[in-house]
Amino acid sequence: DIQMTQSPSSLSASVGDSVTITCRASQGISNSLAWYQQIPGKAPKLLLFAASRLDSGVPSRFSGSGSGTDYTLTISSLQPEDFATYHCQQYYRVPSTFGQGTRLDIK
Amino acid sequence: QVHLVQSGAEVKKPGASVKVSCETSGYMFTAYAIHWVRQAPGQRLEWMGWINGANGNTKYSQKFQDRVTITRDTSASTAYMELRSLRSEDTALYYCARLDGSGFYAHWGQGTLVTVSS
């Protein structure tokens, strides 16, 4: 199975800050990467797919980039509703696998 | 509007089985696959398996291969996930999700908490 490693596991930031979360795959995944946002007690919400494509309705302050094994999610100008846990998912190979999550807290 | 609505929370004893349903609406059930993903406390999301909405073909994670069965009822636009021989480590939130594109999930059920405890 492809292992997905996110970093950091947690971070603190303030409203208005910009943050970047990294996801590294154990082998190349050809941009077959999605990012999700999860609020406690809720299902994950798709933010981006194909590494950099925003899902419908997702604010443009969310952006993704990367290639090969290394990918990033950047949130610019953090809003109060952005404080949540973020997960990456590779869907290049079955079984699809997820990162361990990055918890974003308010500083 | 696409909706996936799951059955309610369950409490089971070790060794028992649980069957979770996922009722869909707002789209043609047979046009999409339904996947099951679980999240144990403090753990990462974990893919369990999927069912083809059109022909009922299934594929399971090797980890759950011997204990899970995913089925569907096209007349009810509903998918089911049964997990057998439950143990305490199976305590988790179980989600169904519709496969979109080539492997990501734009639509999820609300989750079903399964608690395994003696």
Image (cartoon, coloured by chain):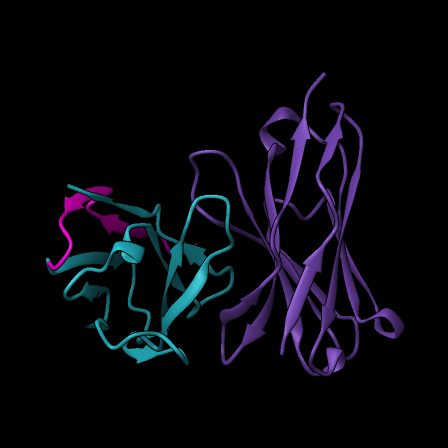
- Whether residue A67 is visible: no
Residue at image coords 20%, 56%: A21
Indicate the position of residue B24 as horizontal and vertical percent values.
72, 69
* Quarter of image, res A31: bottom left
Q: Which residues are magenta?
A: A1-16
Q: Residue furthest top?
A: B118
Task: Work out which quarter of the rendered image holds the C terminus of chain A and state it.
Answer: top left
Q: In this rendering, would B57 be left or right of B61? A: right
* Quarter of image, res B42: top left
Residue at image coords 60%, 53%: B61
- Whether residue A53 is visible: yes
Indicate the position of residue B3 as horizontal and vertical percent values.
65, 69
Please determine whether, in this image, residue A18 is positioned above or below residue B57: above
Q: In this rendering, would A80 be left or right of B21? A: left
Q: Is residue B89 magenta?
A: no
Q: Residue furthest left?
A: A17
Residue at image coords 41%, 81%: A56
Residue at image coords 80%, 71%: B77
Indicate the position of residue A87 as horizontal and vertical percent values.
36, 55
Q: Nearer the viewer, residue A58 or B66?
A: A58
Q: Nearer the viewer, residue B20 or A31?
A: B20
Q: Which chain is purple?
A: B
Task: Work out which quarter of the rendered image holds the N terminus of chain A and state it.
Answer: bottom left
Q: Is residue A6 magenta?
A: yes
Please determine whether, in this image, residue A3 is positioned above or below residue B66: below
Q: Which chain is cyan?
A: A
Q: Nearer the viewer, residue A69 or A17?
A: A17
Q: How many marks?
A: 0
Q: Nearer the viewer, residue A26 or B13?
A: B13
